[in-house]
Image (tube, rainbow, N blue to C red):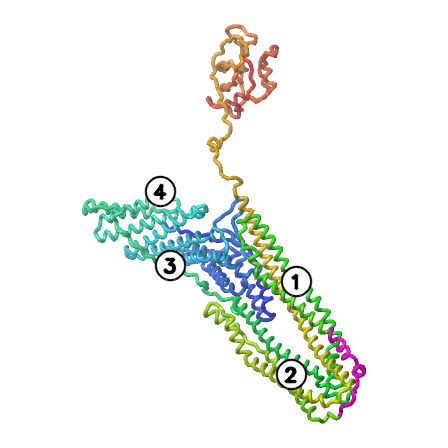
Amino acid sequence: MATFISVPLKKSSEVDLVKPLSKFVTATYPAGEEQGEYIRAVEELNKLRKNALGRPLDKHESSLEILLRYYDQLCAVEPKFPFSDNQLCLTFTWKDAFDKGSLFGGSVKLALASLGYEKTCVLFNAAALASQIASEQNLDNDEGLKAAAKYYQLASGAFGHIKDTVLSALNREPTMDISPETVGTLSLIMLAQAQEVFFLKATSDKMKDAVIAKLANQAADFYGDAFKQCQYKDNLPKYFYFQEVLPVLAAKHCIMQANAELHQSVLAKQKKRFGEEIARLQHAAELVKTVASRYDEYVSVKDLSDKINRALTAAKKDNDFIYHDRVPEVKDLEHIGKAALVKATAITPPLSQKFTDLFEKMVPMAVQQSMSIYNQRKAETVNRLVGSMREATNLCNGVLASLNLPAALEDLSGDSIPQSIAEKARSIVQQGGLQSIEQLIKDLPELLTRNREILDESLKMLDDEETTDNELRTKFNQRWNRTPSGDLYKPLRAEGTNFRNVLDKAVQADQVVRDRYGAHCDMITLLCKPEDELNAAIPSANPTKTLQGSEVVNVLRSQLAQLDEMKKERETLEGEIKAVTFDMSTAFLTALAQDGAINEEQLSLSQLDQLYGAYNQRVQATLRTQEELLGQVQTSHQEFSSLKQSNTEANQREEVLKKLASAHDSYVEISSNLREGTKFYNDLTEILLKFQNKCSDIVFARKTERDELLKELQQSIAREPSAPNFNVPAYQSTPAAGPTPAPRTVFPLQPQQPQQAQQQPPAKPQPPARPPPPSFSPQAASTPPTNTPPTGPPTNNPPPMAPPSQAQGPPYPTYQGYPGYFQMPMGYNPYAYGQYNMPNMPNIPYMPYQATPGQGGYPGAPPAGQPYPGYPQQPPQQQPYYPQQ
């Protein structure tokens, strides 16, 4: 009776996990020990998939452990790689477990770039393998019973988990084997089998009959539910697998119900309800009889039937002779209780007993994304603080240059180069002078063009693929049921638009730098000249040596020294701000573990305020200090200017010195801007290359998905009928074996009677009766035969001659319209017709057959009433018609 149902495994195509995952690791994590560790983990994951799916699995717990370990690893790695964003070029292909395909179409399969699809199929295989392992257990001992119950409950839980998650994991219609209705039915079947195992365990342990009856009744209930769900689904019965399963479920339902009635009858006997005992045993016998008559091919119930019949016979005998208790109707019997001892195993990873996450140190994608946004916020904070200080410093330098400070204090002689101007000239020469700036300006357009080309090529790939997708969607309509490319590419297009805006702003900034360089190009050129040429280019003025010891000059110098000290302090502060580091991944991981989500904005702003709050206060203090010092410098410079002797030459000299100082500051700023611009373009190139790779990967994944879908559509179209169904005429419904030949008429031999010569009638005449064969004695066989003239009116044809003296067999059937018979079987021979006297050949006599000396006679004839073997069976209408003789 112990016939248990197992589920076949799905088959998967080979997938290379190493290339796309290693590519993501290399692009995301810096080169070093951490990156190498992750790449080795990717290789181990690929080996694990090959072990789990790339070879036939034994029906053993070790094989199930491999499958569960791979499933656990998929669950652990899912949040750490961007599978859901289609950034990885990974497509998983699986075949339908139940569809065996056809000669031309092949089995049904589905290819999706979805890790959820891979997880679902792996869990299906784990459930299927668990059902196979359970069905292989020895149910004659406790260990086998416990293992079978465990694995059936695991299979039921796995199938139930797929039922609840498959649609959200795939975001499209799955294949029939993993559809909710199919796995829901399989989950019920596994649960029913687990309950049956508990029934067998209770029976072997000889528990109370009341308990066993409840267990059996619950198992029958489970089998009945599974049978109904399997039978009433539209698509399941078409599979050969479910065609085999349906009768087993029906038989098991009856068997379990019969067992429940059997054990309940024992309980009735104990309570001295002998009529109830007989009614239950009769019901059980009827159920077993139904199984034996309908499902004997699938389940054997001989032992159970014998057991029930023996109990029924004994109960009837006792009741007839002793108790005389009334036997109630089955419908009047008290319902048997139910006891469900099984429960589907909850699927909560890790399911493997020895699971170790290969990517334990890698943070999830949610943390990576939060870290990326946090780093952007941090960079904005640093740039804001550093930019405000640099802007203030440039303002300070501009004010001092407009006042010709400190050159005005150094140029008291009026005929030599001020020390500050000389230092600035040497600084420009050391930094490369005009050549370095011109080279940087020349490189910018090339870098810009390269970035634009990368961005345009990336977006063009998306455009081309989206155009193809739209064309196929228009062609196949609802059949083209994958996600539209336009919807899928929205994040990428938004990212590409952002990159294009960044490039446009960079072009504007480059133009501002070029304009500023053009405004100060002459003065910068002057600062790059030798010292004597620079001195000659600066106009001379009357000496103002009388101001060298004045208090106003000392005050100005003190104030300028304070400004220089403030600038140095800003440089130190800028270095400290840039050096601030903090690992936010720990905070994000903690939040993810506690809340299941990350409030990045709140956590990041709070942490940035703690890190840069003090630095922000120091920056604001330097800004206020600069404002006060500049006000004091302007006041002191007014006093200094009023003490100087003003003349045209002095004004010209001071104006040139101001321009030279301003040119130096502009050179420094322009050089800094150009270097930052070059670095920006180079960094943007790397980012755009990653963006291009992302676009290329998703386009390749979409192309692979498109090809699979096209192949699937072609197969489905090929399997569809080319025309709607129509009623076939009744006479065409039964195939004919061929044309029915006309019956052949065999005429018995009778003495030949004379016939009157007559004209050939328009219709075909009936042939005459055949004469019997002449009888020969053995002695007469060697003498020449004599011809017997026919009686009756004379005819134009000569009398027939006797046949040759040979052993004669039974007569051969003649054809309509031909008198006489052949002495041996003959095929069609046009030359043989001359042996008979024909109307058009009256002078050709019949020549008897002359046997060749040394040649044996013809083989013996077949028994009477049987045709000659090999004789040509030709219908009469195909024979030539000859006039009667």
Mark seen at residue 803: none
- Foreground disc of the pair 3, 1: 1
3D distance between C-alphas at marks 3 and 4: 33 Å
What residue type is disc 3 on? Lys
In contact (CB < 8 Å): disc 3 and disc 1: no
Q: Which mark is residue 343?
A: 3
Q: Amino acid at mark 2?
A: Lys
The residue under the point 62% across, 62% down is 692
Label ID, residue 293: 4
Tell me if 278 is positioned left or right of 427 in this view.
Answer: left
Residue 67, percent across and down? 48, 59
In the rendered image, is residue 685 in sight?
A: no
Q: Which residue is mark 1?
A: 454
**Residue closest to the eye, 625 or 575:** 625
| Chain-order first, disc 1 or disc 4 | 4
Relative placement, left or right, of 313 versus 235 is left
| Disc 2 to disc 4, C-alpha distance | 103 Å
> Gap in Å between the C-alphas at discs 3 and 1?
58 Å
Q: Is residue 660 left or right of residue 197?
A: right
The residue that mark 2 highlights is: 567
Which numbered disc flags the more N-terminal residue, 3 or 1? 3
Q: Looking at the image, is mark 2 or mark 4 earlier in the sequence?
A: 4
Is the residue marked by circle 3 packed among few (<14), some (14-19), or many (20+) residues within 10 Å?
A: some
- Quadrant for residue 686, please give it: bottom right
Element marked by disc 3 = loop
Q: Amino acid at mark 4?
A: Ser
Asked whether 681 or 352 is in front, the reply is: 681
Q: Which residues are magenta?
A: 518-545
